[in-house]
Amino acid sequence: MSSDHSIPPGGTIGILGGGQLGRMTALAAAQLGYRVHIFTPEQDSPASHVSDGVTIAAYEDEAALDRFARQVDVVTLEFENIPASPVRFLSERVPVRPGPRVLEIAQDRLAEKRFFNELGIKTAPWREVKSAGDLEAAFGEIGAPCVLKTARLGYDGKGQAKITSAADLAGAWAGLGTNLGILEGFISFDCEVSALVARGLDGSWAAWDVVQNVHTNHILDTTSAPALLSQPVLDQAVAIAHRAAEALDLVGVLAVEMFLTRDGRLLVNEMAPRPHNSGHWTIDACLTSQFEQVVRAVCGLPLGTPKRHSDAVMTNLIGDMAEAWESYLHEPNAKLHLYGKAERRQGRKMGHVTRLYPLGRRPHS
Ligand SMILES: Nc1ncnc2c1ncn2[C@@H]1O[C@H](COP(=O)(O)OP(=O)(O)O)[C@@H](O)[C@H]1O
Ligand SMILES: [Mg+2]
């Protein structure tokens, strides 16, 4: 259903996925008077703790999907590694925003790179890799250093291997665990930034300030808002994200991660058509958070102003870091967010803390 109708407060938003992004979306939805129903294969998911309804079933379970579709007014998703066919199945029954086409592009690094390059937007050099032979040929063209990634289902650096010489090739290919990969030139970047935009049902759009991200072990460590870069670079980053959102006919929010090269060029790394970890700071530092905005967008409400009222540094609490929760509560400018995950694992995102500063006064990292 590609219906263009809006859903007033009182309606029910269905969310595919039960992680922290769904949880924070559900909290924002409740604030605007909506109910939320989560669909996830996972027991005891973070989003289910704060939602009215939860369906625990496999994404391929059509009977469960059909029941879910009858219980909700609109469907959105909180992560993009959901198989496309259930999303298509749902979209024949209820509006799904963003729709299945957006998902198909965003969940495949090859399709994603093609999408940006066809728009004339630059990325790292890349090659499709389907065999050890392909990898060798691609390495010959791209050269070292480079990084081999699974085309699908990667997140937080999973499914990636850095290659610094030809001696790494066989091990990287064997370790990939699939036979569809992408080889990317490794960008020696000055910094990483992301641009986050929202697009409403009526095509209106809004952008938050561009932010600077630091990854450690391929996992986002901190996001600093705003990015302290020249205005032309900031404008270009927003223009890239807006251009992509338009080309996707996206309804919702879109995060685009980019590298700023040492010679001042922006190269797109990847995108996510949903609230993004690098947008968590917007909860505490902006008039409208990314989570409230996605609710507004998918329900066809007017978008809110993304204006930043404070500078912010968001730090992810990964694994053991969340054990220090009490110390964050003693910091007067820190806002603590915990995701309610019972099981602590190494590398698992357990929460985040956002430290707020007066405008123009965030520490330079
Ligand atoms: N081609 C690249 N050049 C330089 N660094 C990279 C490259 N690809 C990935 N990285 C580093 O690894 C991080 C995670 O990779 P990314 O492709 O965003 O995967 P994920 O889906 O796991 O977030 C990036 O934010 C960046 O720090
Ligand atoms: Mg990433």
Image (cartoon, rainbow, N blue to C red):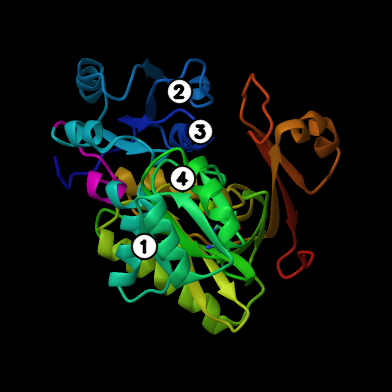
Q: Residues within 10 Å of mark 2 (few under 14, many from 20)?
A: many
SS type, badge 1 = helix
Q: Measured along the vertical axis of the image, is residue 324 above or below residue 316? A: above
Residue 172, position in %: x, y? 53, 48
- Near-viewer residue (335 or 64): 64
Q: Are marks 4 and 3 in contact (CB under 8 Å)?
A: no
Which badge, 3 or 1, is on the more N-terminal residue?
A: 3
- Near-viewer residue (350 or 118): 118
Which badge, 3 or 2, is on the more N-terminal residue?
A: 3
Q: Which residue was labeled with disc 4?
A: 292
Asked whether residue 217 appears in the rendered view, the answer is yes
SS type, badge 2 = loop
Residue type at the position of mark 3: Leu
SS type, badge 3 = helix
Q: Residues within 10 Å of mark 3 (few under 14, many from 20)?
A: some
Q: Which mark is residue 113?
A: 1
Residue type at the position of mark 2: Ser
Q: Is residue 260 left or right of residue 98?
A: right
Q: What is the C-alpha distance between the residues marked 2 and 1?
A: 35 Å
Q: Residues within 10 Å of mark 4 (few under 14, many from 20)?
A: many
Q: Within the image, what quadrant is residue 123 found in?
A: bottom left
Residue type at the position of mark 4: Glu
Q: What is the C-alpha distance between the residues marked 3 and 1?
A: 33 Å
Q: Which residue was labeled with disc 2?
A: 51
Q: Residues within 10 Å of mark 1 (few under 14, many from 20)?
A: many
Is 98 in the magenta? yes
Question: Where are the magenta residues, as a range?
Answer: 93-103
Q: Which residue was labeled with disc 3?
A: 27
Residue type at the position of mark 1: Lys
Tell me the quarter of the image containing the C terminus: bottom right
At horizontal 59% and vertical 66% (from top left) the residue drawn is 145
